[in-house]
Each structure stands twice: as structure tokens, then as C-alpha cells.
Amino acid sequence: MIGLHIARELIDEGRDVVLVEKDAEAARRAGDELDCLVVNEDGSRPETLRKAGVSGSAWFLALTGSDEVNIVACGLVAAECPDVHTVARVENPFYSSLSAAQRRAFGLSVLINPAAETAAAIGRIVDEGFAEDLIPLHDGRLHLRTVLAGSAPAFVGRPLRDAKAEAGNGVLVAAVVRDKGIVVPDGNFIVEATDLLYLLGEPATLDGFLGQVAGVKAGSKRVMVIGATAIGERLVERFVQEAKPGFLGRLFGRKRIVTLLEASPEEGKRVARAHQGVEVLQVDSAEEGVLERSGVGRADLVVCATESQSFNVITAQLAKQLGAKKGVAVILSDRYMPLGAKLDVDALVSIKGVVAAAVLETVRRANIRTIHGFYEDDVELVELTVGAASTVAGRSLREIDLPKGVLVAFVIHGEAMLVPTGATTLNVGDVLGLVSRKKSIPGLERVFGGDRGA
């Protein structure tokens, strides 16, 4: 599923993709769904890789469910095509700990661990502060909030450039959901009362315009993780590490309490031995009354990280109804994202989306990375850093020929967060946030990039 999703994302960005798939039925489905060449053979065989034309590629991505197959395939490519960059998906944390020299020996340019990436993504939103209908960005210095246009009447019924004066220059309409699709608005766009708006701005500015969201920065002293999966264990490790108090913590008793709920006695004991400081309850969270007896209602944060995405969504919702202050559900894909606004769950974190963002950041030029994907359409909020070799350094935004339909959302210059105008000049080291359709990403690479990182 992850390989198919990433192939689709790359194709949507206008890239030439060849997909290698050993399973005949999976290859047939991929051929029906994707506009690319599909090779139905074993990708760990040198002759298959030659047939697929790997020597003429810029990147080789090994994304099967087997660490060993992925590493062997990358090694074969590196041995015959040293100019091709390789990416291997790995599940075992041992491989992620390989040194740079060891990775080079295996022919690995980049390693991506889905569990580690997903746990890190959850850790970031917990650290930055989050709540329903609010997404923190840039260490919480920016917020992306969703509101019905009817509750923000300053934007309704007139061109956005006129509405901006009343709303304040610090509030940007980054995207508009209309008829189940996304519109990237320009100054002439007229908002309708039934639209859903994604508003971007600094927290204080958005709070002044929309009102504060309760509990965004509330601390998480009592944390409960449900499921000793690879993601669950990574989260336990992170939360336990953060719970170790310094002198002031010991003095005032601020130590975080971390509890893991796991049905398997063997898995629970293994995690307890590996991570001292975690309380492990050997219980089946699906059984009636178990969550109540386990104290879920007293938890500041509940993260549901089992292998079942439907169970995670339902249990996170139930935890909130039982009194937990915040609930997070780990999901495999974007299937449940449309339910987000209808649920009490504070965050849905997609493994597929997190891994795809990591891969795309790796293969894109100009350091372009996705900081938020709008699940309603092929639109992303991306950011990039102006490099020393970039041709845009020293030029104003109005002098830069951006792809059509791209909206410059913010510019970070040093410690200053700027709401850009056409006169805003870009300097080396500035960070730009842009709302863009996937098909416009290659255009952004041409404007801001060159070689990767330039």
C-alpha cells in the first residue's frame, strides 16, 4: 500500500515512474490504477532491475515489507549503478542505527523506518500543542485552523483581498474546501458561507480573530499508549525518556506517568524489560469495562497505536468520551480522514502519509518538504529554504515567476515570521511556506532549486 501510494504521489508531481511488483494480481491492479510502466517480476533480481531501466533513474526506492529484500535490492543497484540514489524502507530499528560508513557499504543512501517516522510525527504534535480542528506548524509558531466560513463572516461574499483588511493581514486563507474539492484561492476569490476554510496564522493572531482553542498547550502528565506495536513501543520509549525528571522535576513531583495497555503477555513483558519506567497493563482494550478500570478517564493523552486502524479510531473516540483530555489515533491510510471533523479525536496520524512525506522530501530538489497534506484533494502546504545557490535570493516575490495557482503562505526570516506581499525580498536562509497542487511541485523545483539542497 505504501509503495502504491508513493508511486501515485510521484506520478501526480509529473515524474516518470517505473513500478516493480512480484505479485501478479497486485501488479495488475497497479497497472489499472497508475499511469506508469509496471514490471511484474521479482525486484530483488539483477535482471529485473536491468529490465526496469534502473541505470537511467535518479532514485531507486525499495519499499517492500521485507527489510532484507529492500537492502539487497539497494545493494544490487548501488553495485551496478553508483550514480543512482537508493532509499530502503526498514522496520527493524537495528538498520536505522547503522553508521554512515556502514550504510555506504550496503549501498544505502537513505533509510526510512515507518514506525520511527510515525512516532516522531506524533511526538512533534504533542510537543507543539494540538487540538481538534487545529494543526500546529513550525514548533507551534504557526497554526492551521479549520472553520466553517459562516463563523468567519469577514471573509464571506467579497473578494479575499478586500476581506483581508478587516480580518487582519496576519490571517491567511490558505485553502478552501468546496464541493468536496480544494481551491487554492487568490485575491479575487469570493468565499461562500458553506465553504470550509483553512486559516493560517500565528497563534495569537488567530486566537484574536476566531477565539482561543482550549487545551492546545496543555501538558500531558498522564500518558496512555494502547498497543505494543512498533509505533507503540517507539512512543513509549519517547514518553518514558521525556518523563525522566531533573532536579526541579524531582523536587516538585512533575514526573510523567506512562502506561501501556497490551493484550499479549509476552509483548507487554518485553516492552517493560526494555523501557524501565513504563507501567504495563496486560489487558484487552476491546473488552467491556477495561478502559474504565485502566484509568483512561484520568489520562491527559491517549494514543491508540494497534495494528487495526478502525479499532484505533473508535477507541480514541471512546477514550475522549470517558474523560481523557486528548486522543490520537494511528491510521494506515487517509481512509478515515474525512471523519476527523465529526469525531472528538484530536488527531488522526496516517502512517502512509507520514512515510510518503519523508520519501518525497528526500527525492525533491530545493529541499521541498510537505508540512501538511490536505486529504480532500491533491494540495499540500510545503516549505523550502532559499539556498546559497538559488537564483531567487535577493529578489522580491513579484519578480519570481511562480507556477500558476501557487500561494505563498508565509516567510520566516531569522526569528521573524512574515506575512508576505509582492514586495517581500527573499534572502539566503529564508524559509517559505507555499500552498501548491502536486502537479506544480516540479515548477517549484525549477524556480527555487537546481540540484537537491541548492
Image (tube, helix red, strand yellow):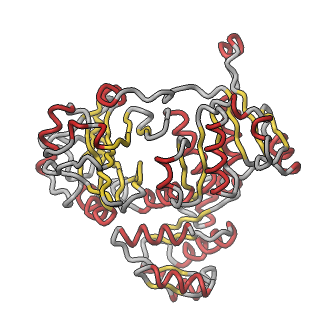
Q: Is residue 443 left or right of residue 289?
A: left
Give the answer, above or below, for where 301 lies relative to 70. above
Residue under the image location 26 percent in, 40 percent down? 172
Query: Residue 21: x, y in percent?
Result: 58, 81
Residue 344: name its quadrant.
top right
Q: Is residue 341 left or right of residue 143?
A: right
Look at the image and tell me whether residue 395 can be seen: no
Residue 448: name its quadrant.
bottom left
Residue under the image location 68 percent in, 11 percent down? 252
Query: Residue 76: x, y in percent?
Result: 60, 76
Q: Quadrant of the C terminus?
A: bottom left
Give the answer, above or below, for where 395 lies relative to 80. above
Most foreground residue, 210 or 263: 210
Most foreground residue, 278 or 304: 304
Give the answer, above or below, for where 268 lies relative to 403. above
Residue under the image location 49 percent in, 35 percent down? 130
Query: Residue 341: x, y in percent?
Result: 46, 47
Number of labels in the image equals 0
Residue under the image location 55 percent in, 50 percent down? 349
Residue 122: name its quadrant.
top right
Give the answer, above or below, for where 348 lies relative to 438. above
Look at the image and tell me whether residue 363 can be seen: yes
Q: Quadrant of the N terminus?
A: bottom right
Residue that protrudes farthest toward the top in the picture:
251
Query: Residue 100: x, y in percent?
Result: 59, 54
Q: Is residue 451 left or right of residue 56?
A: left
